[in-house]
Amino acid sequence: MEEPILQFFEYKHLPTHLQDVSMHFHTLAQTVVKTLPRNPERTVALRKLLEAKDAAVRASIFEG
């Protein structure tokens, strides 16, 4: 069974400099899905990983 949240970890559509940041989160998300049983805690882990990925991408384009 596919994990719908994985669609948000795709990165090949991003510019190269953002792919470099995002691809590591994609790999980790795939590992989480492959190695942990489907349960509420795995879902929490994936959601928090998605939050971290989004923050890392924003950090890489931050102009402060």
Image (cartoon, grey):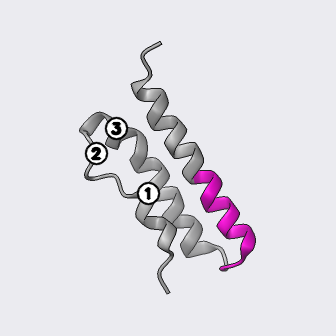
Q: Is residue 9 left or right of residue 11?
A: right
Q: How many marks?
A: 3
Write the residue at 51% across / 75% down: 3
Task: Classify residue 55 by image quadrant.
Answer: top right
Q: Amino acid at mark 1?
A: Phe
N-terminal of the pair, mark 3 or mark 1, is: 1
Residue underneath mark 3: 18
Q: Is residue 21 left or right of residue 55?
A: left
CA distance for labels 3 and 1: 12 Å
* Residue 9 badge: 1
Q: Amino acid at mark 2?
A: Leu
Q: Which residues are magenta?
A: 38-49
Residue 39 at x, y percent in the picture: 71, 78
Element on which disc 2 rests: loop
Magenta stretch: includes residue 44: yes
Write the residue at 67% across / 60% down: 45
* Residue 42 badge: none
Write the residue at 43% across / 28% down: 60
Element on which disc 3 rests: helix
Q: Is residue 14 above or below residue 58?
A: below
Residue at the far front in the pictured view:
64
CA distance for labels 1 and 2: 11 Å
Q: Badge 1: how crowded within 10 Å, few (<14), some, or many (20+)?
A: many
Element on which disc 1 rests: helix
N-terminal of the pair, mark 1 or mark 2, is: 1
Q: Is residue 10 above or below residue 20?
A: below
Residue underneath mark 2: 14
CA distance for labels 2 and 3: 6 Å
Say if mark 1 contacts mark 2, CB within 8 Å: no
Q: Amino acid at mark 3?
A: Leu
Residue 19 at x, y percent in the picture: 33, 43
